[in-house]
Amino acid sequence: MTHVIDSATGSRFAELTLGHLTREWPYKLDQVLAGPADLALPRTLHPVFHGSFDWHSCVHGWWQVMRLARLFPDMAQAGAIEALADRMLVPDRIEGELAYLDRPNTGGFERPYGWAWLLALHDELAQRSDRSWAAAVEPLARAFARRFSAYLPKLIYPVRSGKHDCTAFALVHAVRWARTYDVPLADLIEARARVWFGQDRDCRPWEPSGEDFLSATLCEATLMQMILGADFPQWLAGFLPDPYGAATMCLRTPAVVTDRSDGRLAHLDGVNLSRAWCWRRIADALPDPARARAIADAHLAEALPHLADDYMGEHWLATFALLALEAGGEA
């Protein structure tokens, strides 16, 4: 079975995400307390992104619903999405988010995962004919772009993990944004990616770890597809010389989730969705692209029935499902 995004699926995803974009509890703060005055409710600290269990999930939940409303403007939830955006994606609330970044000890706040998703959100908003929401969010996007520009030259070694600190995953979104809005940052990302990953050969992955939601291996390949362009197939042939062999079996076997009420174990539904996204993205550069797409579909079949099994997955999995379903038609 080939899985696709259509209006009915988009409507279901949007309904799920609208159910938690402004749901305040439970909420996991990413905060270093400098003193008792720093104690405050999430909605005070984050006037926009205080729902969806944590800051980054709220950000990419907004990316998801805004994208769905643009792709399927006639879906039932489109009006509710736009009304909520009119209330939340406004300059005074964004100023509150910017104020949080000025607090002490926030240099590592959401680095790099949340940074990248905020850039993706701004890029999505800018695709609309009405640019008012994009204009409101742009100062926050620029703030995170400056953080990327300061951070990447100091990052000697890329973070090769399957969690939020994964360098390659973040830069997939960041370089897409930067090519339009910050060319020096795009050039920096491309240069650093070539240094970190350009000579990688004959990958021997050991994945997934028990609480991963990303494949560091496949995210690296997806990033290098964006960086290398026409040279990507040659690089990929060296990086994954036998993509269907024994050494890469772990990348082709869907992960098993034993407890979806455990937020960290539920990450493995995400690893299945993010692998599907990557396999679809790189399929045409592999021998037997149809086989790569079949691997992606097997991962989707494992994860898609469980998007709303428990709030520990419901608050974020639909975003990764959308990434994967759209990837079938991406360049």
Image (cartoon, rainbow, N blue to C red):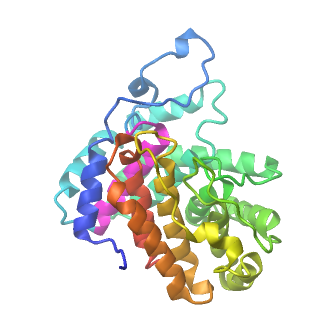
Residue 182 spot, x, y in % from top left: 62, 59
The answer to which image quadrant residue 50 occupies is top left
Q: Nearer the viewer, residue 200 or 255?
A: 255
Residue 98 spot, x, y in % from top left: 52, 35
* Direction from residue 222 to residue 291 in the image, left or right: left
The answer to which image quadrant residue 289 occupies is bottom right
Q: Nearer the viewer, residue 276 or 303?
A: 303
Residue at left offset 75%, top offset 75%? 239
Q: Nearer the viewer, residue 115 or 222?
A: 222
Residue at left offset 55%, top offset 61%? 177
Residue 331 spot, x, y in % from top left: 52, 79
Residue 81 drawn in magenta: no
- Which contiguous range is marked in magenta? 52-71
Residue 59 drawn in magenta: yes
Residue at left offset 47%, top offset 59%? 123
Residue 261 spot, x, y in % from top left: 40, 40
As displayed, is residue 41 above or below residue 170?
above
Residue at left offset 47%, top offset 52%? 257
As displayed, is residue 172 above or below residue 163?
below
Q: Residue furthest bottom?
A: 288
As displayed, is residue 203 above or below residue 178?
below
* Direction from residue 217 to residue 204 in the image, left or right: right
The quarter in which the N terminus is drawn is bottom left
Dominant secondary structure of the residues highlighted in magenta in the image: helix
Task: Decide if residue 331 is in sight here.
Answer: no
* Direction from residue 72 to residue 148 in the image, left or right: right
Count of picture labels: 0
Task: Decide if residue 177 is in sight here.
Answer: yes
Q: Nearer the viewer, residue 275 or 71?
A: 275
